[in-house]
């Protein structure tokens, strides 16, 4: 992890400017370089390397594939996602439930749309699953792989900026999943029109509008899919214009050179 003298900056990235992967079963929008979409000027912000906005068609998904040395946080906006991995963990992730997978020295996993479950009237449904998947680097390489999921919905209903995932000591005991990076935390807020939250003060922040529209103090209107990268500046108010959900990464270090 590195910390240097930083120049204050508020960098707005619009939804339509993201790289896109569109195939038969997947519609994915990438806030940073990902897969075949490589841009050497857009590889990360702070400790955040990936923020993918994925929609997966019913009955499909990501087949078993490997990861190493990454903390992967998944946040579902609509539908449900089935997780299975090589350490024996299984789970169904849905809105309001946070998931963390520590890839560590190596893990295999799959993620599938859970839409073909039978409903109460025994008829299958074919809804897509829409989720945001985010990757941050761990403090250490080669750790044991791990998995955690936690229901956060009750905390979100109380309002405000809710810590969903954290490796910071000051969030010990909080109702959040733990990530293996002591400099990073993810917060989520669901905002009604006119409702506001204040952004944390940190060397690096990443704000993503997962749905709806908000106003950012000093910058104006942000729409669904827009993101803002803050460097050496924080404390702005984010206010709902229509019902909205925002994801905020608070990071107190950046990547080493």
Image: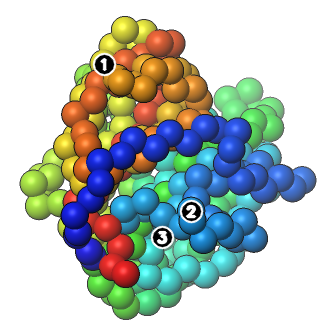
Foreground mark, 2 or 3? 2
Q: Nearer the viewer, residue 15 or 172?
A: 15
Find residue 180 and report its horizontal and vertical position in percent. 29, 71
Q: Which residue is mark 3?
A: 89
Numbered label attached to residue 196: 1
Numbered label attached to residue 42: 2
In this image, 5 relative to 41: left or right? left
SS at circle 2: loop
Choose the circle earlier in sequence order: 1 or 3: 3
SS at circle 3: loop
Q: CA distance from mark 2 to mark 3?
A: 33 Å
Q: Nearer the viewer, residue 24 or 253?
A: 253
> The C terminus is located in which quarter?
bottom left
Choose the circle earlier in sequence order: 2 or 1: 2
Q: Quadrant of residue 64?
A: bottom right
In this image, 114 relative to 143: left or right? right
Q: CA distance from mark 1 to mark 3?
A: 37 Å
Find residue 218 and report its horizontal and vertical position in percent. 36, 24
Cβ–Cβ below 8 Å for labels 2 and 1?
A: no
In this image, 40 relative to 151: left or right? right
For image coordinates 61% across by 38% down, the residue present is 14
For image coordinates 70% across by 39% down, the residue present is 16
């Amino acid at each position: 992890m590195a910390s240097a003298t930083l120049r204050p900056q508020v960098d707005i990235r619009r939804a339509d400017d993201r790289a896109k992967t569109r195939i038969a079963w997947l519609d994915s929008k990438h806030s940073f370089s990902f897969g075949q979409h490589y841009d050497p000027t857009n590889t990360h912000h702070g400790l955040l390397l990936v923020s993918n906005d994925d929609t997966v068609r019913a009955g499909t998904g990501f087949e078993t594939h490997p990861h190493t040395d990454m903390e992967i946080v998944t946040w579902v906006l609509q539908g449900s996602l089935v997780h299975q991995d090589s350490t024996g963990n299984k789970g169904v992730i849905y809105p309001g439930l946070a998931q963390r997978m520590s890839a560590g020295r190596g893990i295999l996993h799959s993620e599938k749309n859970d839409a073909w479950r039978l409903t109460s009237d025994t008829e299958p449904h074919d809804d897509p699953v829409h989720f945001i998947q985010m990757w941050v680097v761990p403090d250490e390489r080669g750790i044991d792989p791990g998995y955690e999921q936690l229901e956060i919905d009750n905390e979100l209903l109380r309002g405000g900026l809710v810590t969903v995932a954290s490796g910071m000591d000051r969030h010990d005991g909080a109702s959040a999943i733990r990530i293996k990076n002591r400099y990073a935390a993810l917060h989520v807020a669901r905002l009604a029109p006119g409702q506001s939250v204040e952004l944390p003060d940190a060397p690096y922040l990443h704000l993503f509008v997962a749905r709806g529209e908000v106003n950012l103090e000093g910058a104006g209107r942000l729409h669904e899919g827009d993101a803002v990268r803050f460097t050496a500046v924080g404390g702005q108010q984010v206010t709902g214009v229509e019902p909205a959900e925002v994801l905020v990464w608070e990071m107190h270090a950046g990547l080493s050179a």
